[in-house]
Image (spheres, rainbow, N blue to C red):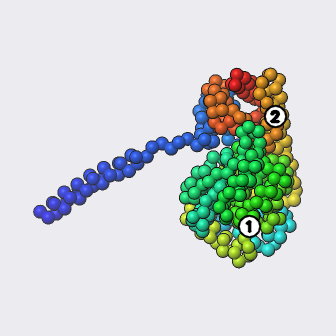
């Protein structure tokens, strides 16, 4: 009798359990599409032979094809069959990190020599930002991050998911299509002392507008005066001027001024290692002892998330940067990518002017890096997509890396058609 009851009870509870289980995800709504990667999805789903993708910031050759750099191919040939596939340490490849720091802090950096930099290999630039955001939250749980308007859309997701309160600061002036320097400086001054500021080291995404050297000096001065902490996202080193050394200018100014800073580096764009997910997070500390402590904490954040970073991309990077000849080839190829983009800026502007566009398109050639912040409205972008199969983010950002000799005329014509009556 007793066993019958207990059987019934367990039977009932398993029915209840089944009902419970089938409802586990019933309240899950589809997530909003990502404003950048969602564009790629829509592009891929479009069967039109005319379609053009100037959405995601990924370099293409003049035939619109993805590029694997020759230095990367050569590094892969050298690596093939020589390395084992053991786990990297939690902080990643020491050799890769060493070479990566030199690019940002300088070959002969005193901070590298004095071992004042806590640095770990990260899951590309996104992973570096996220690791820093988590670190910020862990050790300054009440702090906020000041983010430029506009910025790379994912910055907002990253600091939101790391539970850091976000504030914004002025950056772009839609009227001048340039930097809103006065408002930016005011925001730095008015932020509470000791705030965190997110800065794009070069080739600002999405605007293509960077401060001048003089302006960087003033920004650095003011950030120091207020005791703020500058965190640099450097996803496009080499894409602004064609020369990674020159593109490190802002970082070097801040270093000279004696800041302690944080830095996210990525090889997605400048080495074309997008899917390999290789980058670096570094934090400049007061001394070696502090750097050891900070690095250990960064590793402890990484351990439960992904344990340790992937090995192949790191091996490619350290092989290239550790070999004088391959590094030279890389620098030449970075310059080549930047030059092709600059050429396409001129071509797009000229095509629009030749069509008799009533609008000014000077900003296309004034802006730098991978993107042109065109000034197209979301409605105009929708028309480009619906009527011309041209895909870009709704903020009017054109990835100049996707513009080619073959599609620039078509793109200019479509832009002219949707803007001529504006
Ligand atoms: N920071 C900035 C400013 C940035 O534009 C990107 C990528 C990243 C970091 C991250 O790159 P990673 O691949 O994690 O090293 N931006 C392009 C791709 C993307 O949105 O993921 C883009 O804006 O199109």
Q: With 274 as the anchor, is 327 left or right in this view?
A: right
**Rounded to the nearest whole Å, what is the CA distance between mark 2 and mark 1?**
37 Å
Badge 1 marks a residue whose secondary structure is loop
Q: What count of labels does the image hold?
A: 2
Residue at the outermost left position = 1
| The label number, if any, that marks residue 215 in the structure image | none
Residue beneath the point at 79% across and 70% down: 111
Residue at the outermost bottom position = 289
Q: Position of residue 78 (x, y in %)?
A: 79, 57
User: Closest to the observer: 153 or 144?
Assistant: 144
Residue 302 in sight from this viewpoint: no
C-beta proximity under 8 Å, tags 2 and 1: no
Residue labelled 1 has its Cβ within 8 Å of some atom of ligand 1: no
Residue beneath the point at 86% across and 67% down: 108
Quadrant placement of the C terminus = top right
- Disc 1 packing (10 Å; few <14; some 14–19; many ≥20): some
Q: Position of residue 245 (x, y in %)?
A: 85, 56
Q: Is residue 364 above or below residue 190?
A: above
Q: Is residue 83 above or below residue 200?
A: below
Quadrant placement of the N terminus = bottom left
Badge 2 marks a residue whose secondary structure is helix
Mark 2, residue position: 362
User: Closest to the observer: 1 or 294?
Assistant: 294
User: Closest to the observer: 228 or 34?
Assistant: 228
Mark closer to the chain start, 2 or 1: 1
Q: Position of residue 37 (x, y in %)?
A: 62, 42
Mark 1, residue position: 260
Q: Position of residue 253 (x, y in %)?
A: 82, 60
Residue 168 in sight from this viewpoint: yes
Residue beneath the point at 63% across and 46% down: 153
User: Closest to the observer: 301 or 170?
Assistant: 170
């Amino acid at each position: 009798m007793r066993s019958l009851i207990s059987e019934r009870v367990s039977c009932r509870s398993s029915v209840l359990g089944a009902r419970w289980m089938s409802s586990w995800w019933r309240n899950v709504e589809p997530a909003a599409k990502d404003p950048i990667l969602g564009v790629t999805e829509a592009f891929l789903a479009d069967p039109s032979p005319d379609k053009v993708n100037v959405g995601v910031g990924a370099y293409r050759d003049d035939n619109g094809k993805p590029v694997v750099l020759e230095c990367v191919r050569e590094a892969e040939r050298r690596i093939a069959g020589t390395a084992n596939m053991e786990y990297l340490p939690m902080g990643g490849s020491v050799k890769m990190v060493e070479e990566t720091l030199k690019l940002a802090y300088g070959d002969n950096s005193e901070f590298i020599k004095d071992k004042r930099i806590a640095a770990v290999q990260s899951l590309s630039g996104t992973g570096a930002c996220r690791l820093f955001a988590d670190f910020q939250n862990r050790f300054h749980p009440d702090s906020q991050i000041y983010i430029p308007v506009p910025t790379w859309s994912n910055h907002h997701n990253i600091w939101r998911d790391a539970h850091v309160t976000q504030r914004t600061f002025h950056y772009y002036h839609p009227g001048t299509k340039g930097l809103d320097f006065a408002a930016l400086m005011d925001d730095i001054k008015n932020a509470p002392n000791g705030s965190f500021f997110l800065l794009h080291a070069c080739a600002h995404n999405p605007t293509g507008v960077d401060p001048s050297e003089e302006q960087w000096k003033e920004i650095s001065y003011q950030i120091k005066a207020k005791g703020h902490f500058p965190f640099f996202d450097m996803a496009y080193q080499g894409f602004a001027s064609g020369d990674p050394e020159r593109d490190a200018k802002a970082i070097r100014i801040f270093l000279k001024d004696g800041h302690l800073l944080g830095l996210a580096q990525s090889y997605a764009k400048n080495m074309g290692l997008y899917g390999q997910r290789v980058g670096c997070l570094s934090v400049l500390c007061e001394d070696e002892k502090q750097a050891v402590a900070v690095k250990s904490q960064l590793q402890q954040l990484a351990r439960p998330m992904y344990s340790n970073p992937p090995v192949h991309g790191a091996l490619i990077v350290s092989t290239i940067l550790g070999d004088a000849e391959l590094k030279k080839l890389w620098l030449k190829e970075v310059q080549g990518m930047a030059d092709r983009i600059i050429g396409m800026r001129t071509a797009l502007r000229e095509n629009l002017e030749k069509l008799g566009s009533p609008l000014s398109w000077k900003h296309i050639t004034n802006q730098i890096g991978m993107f042109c912040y065109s000034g197209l409205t979301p409605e105009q972008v929708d028309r480009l997509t619906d009527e011309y199969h041209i895909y870009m983010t709704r903020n009017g950002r054109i990835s100049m890396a996707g513009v080619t000799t073959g599609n620039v005329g078509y793109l200019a014509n479509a832009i002219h058609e949707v803007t001529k009556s504006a």
